[in-house]
Amino acid sequence: MASQGSEGLEEQLEEPEDTLRVSPAEEMPVEGPPALEEPEQEPLLLPWDRFSSWLHCICVVGFDLELGQAVEKTSICYLSFPDSNSGCLGDTQFCFRFRQAAGSKSSLGCFLDHFDRDAPVCLKVSGYYYGYVYFRQVRDKTLKRGYFQKSLVLISKLPYVTFFHSLLKLIAPEYFEKQEPFLEAACNDIDRWPTPCPGKILTLPIMGVVMKVTSDSLVSIVLPTVHEVDLFRCFHPVFFHIQMLWELVLLSEALVVMAPSPAESSDTVLALVSCISPLRYCSDFRPYFTIHDSEFKEYTTRTQAPPSVILGVTNPFFAKTLQHWPHIIRIGDMKQAGEMAKQMKVKKLKNLKTLDSKPGVYTAYKPFLNKDEDIIKQLQKGVQQKRPSAAQNAILRRYFLELTQSFIIPLERYVASLMPLQKSISPWKSPPQLRPFNQEEFMKTLEKAGPQLTSRLKGDWIGLYRQFLRSPNFDGWFRNRRKEMMQKLEALHLEALCEEDLQLRIQKHTEVETVDLVLKLKEKLTQAEKDQLPVKPGTLPKLQAHIESIILTLPEDLQGILHKPPSP
């Protein structure tokens, strides 16, 4: 295999000197039309800043009999190609995910914090990169192997699965025909895009086509979503077990998806992760995992319990290597989604011996909740009546959404009660602390304010909550909620300070105490701007005005010192 990419991935990409090389963004020429007009608040961008806010790099991975062994340690090369048993002729799209090297900086740079702050939980950036792959394999008698095999791979921190797959559909076929000049032109187009901004409509021209995430204007391509996969198509082979799969993902259980191709493997893993939305899945997940992955030994060892991770695999070798894992999902061919799956019983793990085993869920897990027969019948009826796949997907996504919301609302309600009363906030004291989360106290609230208020499902909800409170998903959710509430307390404290008559206050202060107050207020203002605290409009300018008025009461020499910007 031969590959190329940016220097930021040197631990993953070790490029031989004699391999074909496409220049990364920072090395490409910067000629081209002027950039698109941007919102006023966007900082002045350097060449390739816009490109880097969307992509870390672009890799081209080709199979070469002479060079193949030269890059054997390059895991991205192996992740970019289907396993040989997949038999993927033609064009195939899938994605993979890998850890960001410790200490390395993301190409998103200064855009990352701004993006992450405004993004919904399902789109927040984590310490991982995504690889979006467009793989082509066609017969070619002129080559020693008899096949042309090449992948175009987009590496990004952004979890925009649908968007990047759509982008690859536009540029990859043209690249295979026109080679490097086309790819450089596409990169120049991407460098004219506005930077990612959650909640805003973006118009993204690429090689004569316009992509837009909206449905209210005439454009070449409209994307209603940038990240969601078709849940109904992905879960069709294990249709009767969707509720149990929801529980397994909710509880961060170790799951393996065994599929016939990387496309089906990655789509199913992404569907599993998204089925608990709007709750964020906080454990690791790998849409396409191979024996060459750097975490292979860590995830397949038998000396300890399987980690909390969802793996998507296609290599038959994993049927033996991972047979000690507690939950295994065998996915068949998704192309037969027009017929309803027939298997109904959960299969025993000992029956899973090879990758040729029948599709189904192999586990000893006993669900906490009773099965919801209504959703099964509703979707079965849809298949019989040939209801459009998009409608089936919408029904299933709404079902998962309502189920997750019913589960999370009691937790939200209890955590909100941990906030101190607003009247306890004093401008001249530190903000009060949140009450600690008490598991038994929360359990008592479920009797009158539990999920039964919004869900018709019966079962052991208490047991499900107890298990969830021990999971990484709860830990991640509570950390995020605690951070939000602490910031709210800081914001309320800041607003209370702004309502005070500070001029009257400093009349009783010595000069040293007044300087100390100015320094503390300036520190709070800087921190509030950095953390983007949820304060009322006008609060920060008002605090700045207070600081200025206090400084003016001090001698001129101190005024000069306090007006100096802080040293970096």
Image: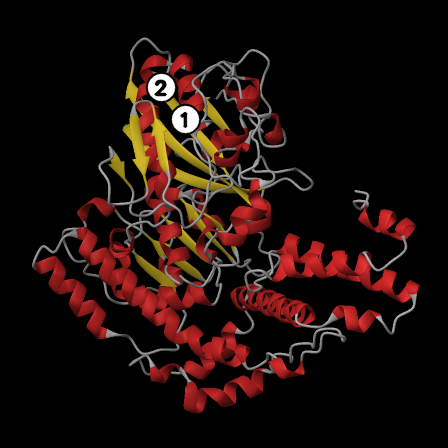
Q: Which mark is residue 152?
A: 1
Q: Amino acid at mark 1?
A: Leu
Q: Is residue 256 above or below residue 368?
A: above
Which of the colour schemes (rainbow, by chain, secondary structure, one colour) is used?
secondary structure
Asked whether, in this view, residue 556 is left or right of residue 493, the answer is right
Element marked by disc 1 = strand
Q: Is residue 147 visible?
A: no
Q: In the rendered picture of this protein, how many numbered marks are placed on residues?
A: 2
Q: Secondary structure at mark 2?
A: helix
Pick the front one: 535 or 283: 535
User: Which quadrant holds residue 12?
Assistant: top right
**What separation in Å lies between label 1 and label 2 (alpha carbons)?**
8 Å
Q: Position of residue 41 (x, y in %)?
A: 53, 41
464 lies above or below 313: below
Which label is found at residue 175? Answer: 2
Location of the C terminus by quadrant is top right
Which amino acid type is shown beneath numbered disc 2?
Answer: Tyr
306 or 231: nearer the eye? 231
Q: Name the residue at 32% across, 8% down.
A: 142
Cβ–Cβ under 8 Å for marks 1 and 2? yes
Image quarter of residue 441: bottom right
Residue 91 is situated, as x and y percent measured from the top left of the image, at 29, 29
In this view, the residue in front, 406 or 486, is: 486
On the image, the x and y values in percent for residue 387 come to 12, 56
Observer-nearest of 514 and 226: 514
Q: Residue at x 76, y 75 (%)?
A: 428
> Where in the figure is residue 534, as x and y percent of width and height?
56, 63
